[in-house]
Amino acid sequence: MNRIIPSVLLVLIAGCASMPDGPRVAVMPAPGKPFEVFVADDRLCRNFAAQSIGTTPNELANRKLVDTAVAGTAIGAAAGALAGGQHGAATGAAIGMVAGTASGAGQASVSGSEAQRRYDIAYQQCMYAKGNQLPGSAYPYRAMPPPPPASPYPPPPPPR
Protein backbone atom coordinates (compact mmCIF):
# COMPACT_ATOMS: atom_id res chain seq x y z
CA MET A 1 0.00 0.00 0.00
CA ASN A 2 2.86 2.40 0.80
CA ARG A 3 4.24 1.97 -2.71
CA ILE A 4 0.90 2.38 -4.46
CA ILE A 5 0.07 5.81 -3.03
CA PRO A 6 3.28 7.52 -4.27
CA SER A 7 2.86 5.91 -7.70
CA VAL A 8 -0.73 7.09 -8.01
CA LEU A 9 0.24 10.57 -6.80
CA LEU A 10 3.07 10.73 -9.32
CA VAL A 11 0.77 9.75 -12.20
CA LEU A 12 -1.83 12.34 -11.16
CA ILE A 13 0.73 15.13 -10.89
CA ALA A 14 2.39 14.16 -14.20
CA GLY A 15 -1.00 14.48 -15.86
CA CYS A 16 -1.12 18.14 -14.82
CA ALA A 17 1.94 19.13 -16.85
CA SER A 18 0.52 19.54 -20.30
CA MET A 19 1.19 21.85 -23.17
CA PRO A 20 -0.52 22.17 -26.51
CA ASP A 21 0.56 19.68 -29.14
CA GLY A 22 0.58 22.30 -31.86
CA PRO A 23 1.90 25.70 -32.79
CA ARG A 24 1.12 28.80 -30.76
CA VAL A 25 1.50 31.07 -33.75
CA ALA A 26 -1.03 32.10 -36.35
CA VAL A 27 -0.36 31.55 -40.03
CA MET A 28 -2.72 32.59 -42.81
CA PRO A 29 -3.04 31.11 -46.28
CA ALA A 30 -1.64 33.13 -49.15
CA PRO A 31 -4.27 35.05 -51.15
CA GLY A 32 -5.86 32.72 -53.67
CA LYS A 33 -4.46 29.54 -52.06
CA PRO A 34 -7.15 26.85 -51.73
CA PHE A 35 -7.99 25.98 -48.14
CA GLU A 36 -7.36 22.26 -48.75
CA VAL A 37 -3.79 23.06 -49.82
CA PHE A 38 -3.32 25.23 -46.72
CA VAL A 39 -4.54 22.37 -44.47
CA ALA A 40 -2.12 19.98 -46.19
CA ASP A 41 0.71 22.50 -45.63
CA ASP A 42 -0.29 22.76 -41.96
CA ARG A 43 -0.15 18.99 -41.43
CA LEU A 44 3.19 18.70 -43.18
CA CYS A 45 4.67 21.60 -41.20
CA ARG A 46 3.39 20.27 -37.86
CA ASN A 47 5.17 16.99 -38.58
CA PHE A 48 8.29 18.85 -39.68
CA ALA A 49 8.32 20.95 -36.48
CA ALA A 50 7.83 17.90 -34.24
CA GLN A 51 10.67 16.05 -35.99
CA SER A 52 12.95 19.07 -35.81
CA ILE A 53 12.77 19.20 -32.00
CA GLY A 54 12.76 15.40 -31.64
CA THR A 55 9.47 15.22 -29.75
CA THR A 56 6.35 17.19 -29.00
CA PRO A 57 6.58 19.89 -26.32
CA ASN A 58 4.06 17.96 -24.20
CA GLU A 59 6.13 14.74 -24.23
CA LEU A 60 9.30 16.65 -23.34
CA ALA A 61 7.69 18.43 -20.38
CA ASN A 62 6.14 15.23 -19.01
CA ARG A 63 9.42 13.34 -19.34
CA LYS A 64 11.25 16.09 -17.40
CA LEU A 65 8.57 16.07 -14.67
CA VAL A 66 8.67 12.30 -14.16
CA ASP A 67 12.49 12.13 -14.24
CA THR A 68 12.81 14.83 -11.55
CA ALA A 69 10.09 13.28 -9.37
CA VAL A 70 11.80 9.87 -9.51
CA ALA A 71 15.15 11.42 -8.62
CA GLY A 72 13.55 13.35 -5.73
CA THR A 73 11.94 10.16 -4.41
CA ALA A 74 15.27 8.30 -4.47
CA ILE A 75 17.16 11.13 -2.80
CA GLY A 76 14.41 11.55 -0.18
CA ALA A 77 14.41 7.82 0.57
CA ALA A 78 18.19 7.80 0.99
CA ALA A 79 18.09 10.86 3.25
CA GLY A 80 15.24 9.39 5.29
CA ALA A 81 17.06 6.07 5.69
CA LEU A 82 20.18 7.86 6.92
CA ALA A 83 18.14 9.98 9.32
CA GLY A 84 15.67 7.51 10.78
CA GLY A 85 15.83 3.90 9.58
CA GLN A 86 13.04 2.12 7.69
CA HIS A 87 10.18 4.40 8.71
CA GLY A 88 12.37 7.40 7.96
CA ALA A 89 13.06 6.01 4.49
CA ALA A 90 9.34 5.84 3.67
CA THR A 91 8.75 9.33 5.00
CA GLY A 92 11.83 10.64 3.23
CA ALA A 93 10.70 9.03 -0.02
CA ALA A 94 7.28 10.66 0.25
CA ILE A 95 8.76 14.06 1.03
CA GLY A 96 11.38 13.62 -1.69
CA MET A 97 8.71 12.69 -4.21
CA VAL A 98 6.64 15.76 -3.40
CA ALA A 99 9.68 18.05 -3.48
CA GLY A 100 11.05 16.38 -6.61
CA THR A 101 7.68 16.66 -8.33
CA ALA A 102 7.39 20.34 -7.43
CA SER A 103 10.89 20.96 -8.74
CA GLY A 104 10.15 18.84 -11.80
CA ALA A 105 7.00 20.82 -12.52
CA GLY A 106 9.03 24.02 -12.62
CA GLN A 107 11.74 22.49 -14.79
CA ALA A 108 9.16 20.85 -17.03
CA SER A 109 7.51 24.21 -17.56
CA VAL A 110 10.81 25.83 -18.58
CA SER A 111 11.81 22.85 -20.71
CA GLY A 112 8.38 22.73 -22.32
CA SER A 113 8.43 26.46 -23.06
CA GLU A 114 11.81 26.18 -24.78
CA ALA A 115 10.61 23.20 -26.81
CA GLN A 116 7.45 25.11 -27.74
CA ARG A 117 9.55 28.09 -28.89
CA ARG A 118 11.72 25.87 -31.10
CA TYR A 119 8.61 24.08 -32.42
CA ASP A 120 6.94 27.40 -33.31
CA ILE A 121 10.05 28.64 -35.15
CA ALA A 122 10.32 25.44 -37.20
CA TYR A 123 6.58 25.55 -37.96
CA GLN A 124 6.72 29.19 -39.09
CA GLN A 125 9.76 28.54 -41.29
CA CYS A 126 8.02 25.63 -42.99
CA MET A 127 4.72 27.46 -43.50
CA TYR A 128 6.53 30.54 -44.86
CA ALA A 129 8.53 28.35 -47.25
CA LYS A 130 5.21 26.93 -48.49
CA GLY A 131 4.10 30.45 -49.42
CA ASN A 132 1.77 31.11 -46.48
CA GLN A 133 1.62 34.43 -44.63
CA LEU A 134 2.85 35.09 -41.12
CA PRO A 135 0.99 37.85 -39.27
CA GLY A 136 3.08 40.98 -39.00
CA SER A 137 5.06 40.25 -42.11
CA ALA A 138 4.53 42.00 -45.41
CA TYR A 139 3.49 40.25 -48.53
CA PRO A 140 6.28 38.22 -50.08
CA TYR A 141 8.90 40.37 -51.81
CA ARG A 142 8.34 40.63 -55.51
CA ALA A 143 11.28 41.90 -57.50
CA MET A 144 10.65 44.51 -60.15
CA PRO A 145 11.11 43.19 -63.67
CA PRO A 146 14.47 44.05 -65.15
CA PRO A 147 14.61 47.05 -67.49
CA PRO A 148 14.24 46.29 -71.17
CA PRO A 149 17.47 45.39 -72.89
CA ALA A 150 19.48 48.19 -74.42
CA SER A 151 18.93 48.94 -78.05
CA PRO A 152 21.19 46.89 -80.30
CA TYR A 153 22.08 50.04 -82.23
CA PRO A 154 24.26 52.75 -80.72
CA PRO A 155 22.73 56.21 -80.36
CA PRO A 156 23.39 58.67 -83.17
CA PRO A 157 26.31 61.03 -82.75
CA PRO A 158 25.56 64.53 -81.44
CA PRO A 159 24.98 67.24 -84.08
CA ARG A 160 27.95 69.49 -84.96
Image: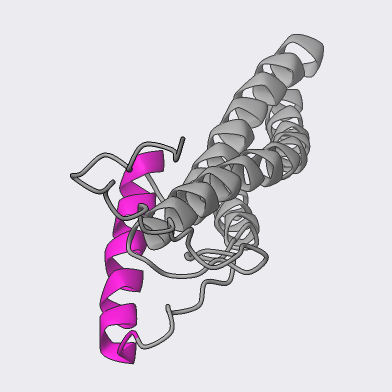
Q: In the figure, is residue 22 to the left or right of 154?
A: right
Location of residue 100 in the rendering, given as x and y in whole percent from the top left corner = 71, 34
Front position in the image: 62 or 31: 31
Colouring scheme applied when the structure was drawn: one colour
Q: Is 11 situated above or below 63? A: below
Q: Is 149 situated above or below 84? A: below
Range drawn in magenta? 33-53
Q: Is 145 situated above or below 81? A: below
Look at the image and say whether residue 50 sits in the magenta stretch: yes
Q: How many marks?
A: 0
Q: Quadrant of residue 123?
A: bottom left
Look at the image and say whether residue 46 sits in the magenta stretch: yes
Location of residue 80 in the rendering, given as x and y in whole percent from the top left corner = 75, 20
Q: In the figure, is residue 97 to the left or right of 52?
A: right
The single residue placed furthest to the left in the displayed view is: 152
Location of residue 90 in the rendering, given as x and y in whole percent from the top left corner = 68, 32
Q: In the figure, is residue 129 to the left or right of 83?
A: left
Location of residue 77 in the rendering, given as x and y in whole percent from the top left corner = 66, 24
Residue pictured at 62% horizontal, 37% vertical:
69
Residue pictured at 53% horizontal, 43% vertical:
118
Residue pictured at 55% horizontal, 41% vertical:
66
Q: Quadrant of residue 144?
A: bottom left
Q: Main secondary structure of the magenta part?
A: helix
